[in-house]
Amino acid sequence: MDVIASVVNGAYIDPDNDGKVTLSVPTRSVVIADSLLGMEAEIVAALDLEPPFAVVSDPDTHAVMGERIELAISSLGQVIKVLLGKNPHADMQTVEAVMTETRNAGTLIAVGSGTINDLCKFAAARQGKDCVVFATAPSMNGYTSVNAAITEHGHKKSLPALAPCGVFMDLEVLAAAPKRMIQSGLGDSICRATAQVDWLLSHLLFDSEYREAPFQLLAEDEKILLAEPEALVSGDLDAMGRLARTLVLSGMGMSVCGGSYPASQGEHLISHYIDMMHPTDWEEAFHGEQIAVTTCVMARLQQQVLLGPPPRVSSTKATKQSILSHFSNETGVAAGTNLTRNV
Ligand SMILES: [Zn+2]
């Protein structure tokens, strides 16, 4: 059976538990097809979700797919159209706005990629509602994860949310996404290698939990995906299918582990630092674009550790005061709080 279908159906044997149990994820349906045109209502109906349906999009994703979804879903029940502003941010203010607009909905239907998916799965979790997502870009691996990246008081946090119960990917739509968003999805996927090494190192040094399952899920598609990455930006739907599957499986790997450990380690910390501290004259980059670069930095650091003497663990020399003076704003308070918690 296909890996994704096997996980969704609860048939995938967990390699970390002596083959005695199967993996379990909250997502009940994943449909990846060359085109979903004409199937939209059917695949949502199969999940037997509560109407009315709030279809959440922004002007860009509405033009790409939102309008088509609103029309198709109207055959299933009342549709509440929620059109966010251009380039919305996944912050608390926008979460509140989404919750207000969707207060009468039974189910949230996100039409978008990272930001809209995060907003909907977080708002749905706070409202105790279900959500599904129609992806418009293959730009990140959070479609099936149980956390949402939400900015609160200027500090980006990974907060508990709800994995969409349905994830629907139209490969023709994904292949037509802006080239930088496609590259970003590949960037957010290649950190598998550095994240695995960091996580394993943490396990070996601190005896923290480590699992093979998330990496086993990705292994088959990764080889083919990385053999010919250029195909992703030439409209090749087979290649796009590999990336879509990788993003879905990466998110499921995080769900299985109850956290982002298999897909976010040192390279993501460097990227989060850039998010907090980047000079105002820097152009804004997509998450996965930064990860593509910080993965190379992390790989180089790991290489140095491997070539050097065995690592020795010592406590950090940073103090709460040094962190506060470095960040010098409310971001510093949040970072300093995290530091004292982690030390
Ligand atoms: Zn990431």
Image (cartoon, rainbow, N blue to C red):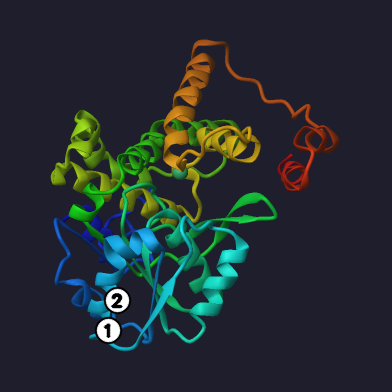
Q: Does residue 207 appear to the left or right of 212 in the view shown?
A: right
Residue 153 on image: x %, y %: 70, 55
Q: Does residue 119 appear to the left or right of 180 in the view shown?
A: right
Q: Which residue is mark 1?
A: 74
Q: Which residue is mark 2?
A: 70
Amino acid residing under circle 2: Glu
Q: Residue furthest right?
A: 321
Q: Quadrant of ligand 1?
A: top left
User: Which residue is found at the position 44% from the left and 30% from the top?
Assistant: 194
Which numbered tag is attached to residue 17?
A: none
> In the rendered structure, are the residues bearing label 2 and label 1 in contact, judged by CB atoms less than 8 Å apart?
yes
Compared with residue 145, is residue 263 higher up or lower down, i.e. above or below?
Answer: above
Compared with residue 5, is residue 76 higher up or lower down, i.e. above or below?
Answer: below
Q: In which image quadrant can residue 324 be found?
A: top right
Residue 265 on image: x %, y %: 52, 37
Residue 301 on image: x %, y %: 53, 20
Q: Which quadrant is home to the C terminus? A: top right
Pointer 2 local density, CA inside 10 Å: few below 14, some 14–19, many at least 20: many
